[in-house]
Amino acid sequence: MSAAFTLVFLAALAAATGSRLWLAVRQMRHVRAHRAAVPASFADAIPLDAHQKAADYTVAKTRLGMVDALLDAAVLLALTLGGALQGLSDLWARVLAPSSLGHGTALVLSVLALRGLLELPLGAWRTFGIEQRFGFNRMTVALFVADVVKHALVGAALGVPLLGAVLWLMREAGERWWLYAWALLVAYSLFLQMIYPAVVMPLFNKFSPLADAALAERVERLLARCGFRAKGLYVMDGSKRSAHGNAFFTGFGASKRIVLFDTLLARLRPAEIEAVLAHELGHYKLHHVAKGMLLSWAVSFALLAALGWLAGEPWFYQGLGVKSASLGAALLLFLLVVPEFTFFLQPAMSLYSRRHEFEADRYATRHSAARELIAALVKLYQDNAATLTPDPLHSTFYDSHPPAAARIARLRAT
Ligand SMILES: [Zn+2]
């Protein structure tokens, strides 16, 4: 049984990694093939040099993605069949009883930390290699290091109590531990959303109230038109890290805030900012945010049920290179292996997300002006060097947002 499961795992890993690489190659080939000319529908809005920069930027990012996919696969193989997980488990067992919460926690944390360290060079390459070369990076090495340390500390502060609680439930709560763990996860995700804007985000960025009174008034009018209440309108110093612009909402219920990147304010006209916000409001008003949360709860329910079953099956451990079953090993193996099996659900998730983007665009055209949203999107595509000519299959598979041409064609038709 365990040998059969090893084969299933290897087949899933090979299929997922092979597909990731194949899609990346297609994307690079397609973008390069369309590098010479701006697509006709953007010819008057986007200059050729910007189009070519977007092509080169896309190719560079996609190539990094290929390295990432290969590294991921190698690390996963080393941890499982390569015996690294078993080795670490044995190491911790010298100081902590293998069935203890301490052992489980130490094992999970050490593997996650190890993986984080291995991925660090790729993150540095992304920031100081690619983003730097294309003029997007604003980070210093000191800020990069401070971010890594802070993320690790925040991750530990928020994650270790949850991890400890889940391991405790696995050990003490009997057969249905996974059901309690799921309830805990749902409650914890609500708690995180509540504290995130006020407690976590200020650790990384400065938020100041929007100073531009005319723009603030314009936004207030939009909110009133849409019947939306928010607890404040903030500007975030996104320029501290990157030249990319963005706008988003955080929190939920009474603690909702609207956050605009300073880079977005610097680049878009007030009417365009209003249109972008109207799109974001659409996501709330059409319940995309609530639906997304419900969907993630449903997915974690299914996954935890699967873990509840697998954690009791010896072939699950043995098939993945772990001889001594333990709580920490069960949790880790599951977290590590699941993405290889769920990879092929990606196109469905992307389709679902793209449908929501079209709906939010339609909402924006009803409460703001379509031509302003088009103008804003064209500027954002250009500023972010987003490719206008993605490979159709790559786009179908991964893209959470519709391709630029399709999106703007629909906006023009309204
Ligand atoms: Zn959107």
Image: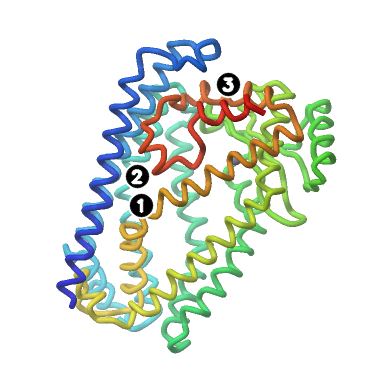
Left or right, 21 with respect to 47, comes to left
* Residue 411 position by quadrant: top right
Of 375 and 80, nearer the camera is: 375
Badge count: 3
In whole angstroms, how far apart are the C-alphas of marks 3 and 2?
32 Å
Residue that numbered label 2 is attached to:
120
Task: Report the residue marked by disc 1.
Answer: 116
Measuring from the top left, give residue 298's x and y in whole percent: 52, 66
**How far, Cα to Cα, is label 2 from label 1?**
6 Å
- The label nearer to you, 3 versus 1, is 3
Give the quarter of the figure containing the C terminus: top right
Q: Residue at x 46, y 27 (%)?
A: 386
Disc 3 versus disc 2: nearer the observer: 3
- 322 w.r.t. 32: above or below: below
Q: Which residue is mark 3?
A: 379
Instruction: Decide: few, some or many residues near mark 3? Use Cα within 10 Å; few <14, some 14-19, many ≥20.
Output: some
Residue displayed at 43% across by 75% down: 305
Q: Specify which label sits upstream in the sequence, 3 or 2.
A: 2
Vertical relation: 135 (above or below) 19 = above
Kind of residue at disc 1:
Gly
CB within 8 Å, label 2 to label 1: yes
Picture quarter with ligand 1: top right
Tell me whether the residue at label 3 lies in contact with that at label 1, contact meaning CB atoms closer than 8 angstroms: no
Instruction: Sort mark 1 into few (<14), some (14-19) or many (20+) by Cα contacts within 10 Å.
Output: some
Alpha carbon of mark 3 to alpha carbon of mark 1: how far? 35 Å
Asked which secondary structure carries label 3, the reply is helix
